[in-house]
């Protein structure tokens, strides 16, 4: 099954998910990714990187705290 990137509309075989907008993106649309904990990897796309509140949340790893409390 072929998947398409929701940001650039390219055909992709390895897909990633942006943790801040929820879109399926390709590797060229990833702005940054980091390992927050041993089992959780955070990914942010180029569109979310230009949004300052989302970038601050990414850099302070606030998404990790919200997911671990659930």
Image: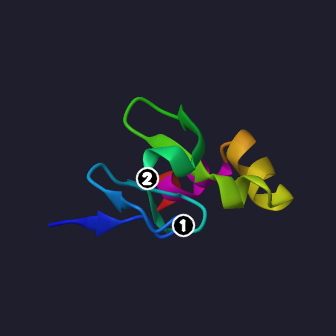
Indicate whether 53 appears above or below 43.
Answer: below
Q: Is residue 66 magenta?
A: yes
Picture colour scheme: rainbow
For the stretch drawn in magenta, what is the main secondary structure? helix
Q: Residue at x 52, y 58 (%)?
A: 18
Q: Is residue 19 toward the left or the right of residue 26 in the image?
A: right
Instruction: Read off the residue under disc 1.
Output: 7
Hey, which residue is sitting farthest right in the picture? 52
Q: Position of residue 33 (x, y in %)?
A: 55, 38
Could you tell which of marks 1 and 2 lies nearer the N-terminus? 1
Instruction: Read off the residue under disc 2.
Output: 26
- How crowded pointer 2 is (Cα within 10 Å; few <14, some 14-19, many 20+) is rated as many
Q: Quadrant of the N terminus?
A: bottom left
Q: Secondary structure at mark 2?
A: loop
Hey, which residue is sitting farthest front in the picture? 10
Query: Can the viewer see residue 45?
Result: yes
Q: Position of residue 12 (x, y in %)?
A: 32, 56
Q: Residue at x 66, y 43 (%)?
A: 61
Residues rendered magenta in the picture: 62-67
Q: Are marks 1 and 2 in contact (CB under 8 Å)?
A: yes
The circle drawn on residue 21 is none
Q: Nearer the viewer, residue 8 or 20?
A: 8
Query: Can the viewer see residue 60?
Result: no
Q: Nearer the viewer, residue 55 or 14?
A: 14
Q: Nearer the viewer, residue 60 or 16?
A: 16
Q: Residue at x 73, y 52 (%)?
A: 49
Q: Is residue 29 toward the left or the right of residue 49 in the image?
A: left
Q: Is residue 18 magenta?
A: no
């Amino acid at each position: 099954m072929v998947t398409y990137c929701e940001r650039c509309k390219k055909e992709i075989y390895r897909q990633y998910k942006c943790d801040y907008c929820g879109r399926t993106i390709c590797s060229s649309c990833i702005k940054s990714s980091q390992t927050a904990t041993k089992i959780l990897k955070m990914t942010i796309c180029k569109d979310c990187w230009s949004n300052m509140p989302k970038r601050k949340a990414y850099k302070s790893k606030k998404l990790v705290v919200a997911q671990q409390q659930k």
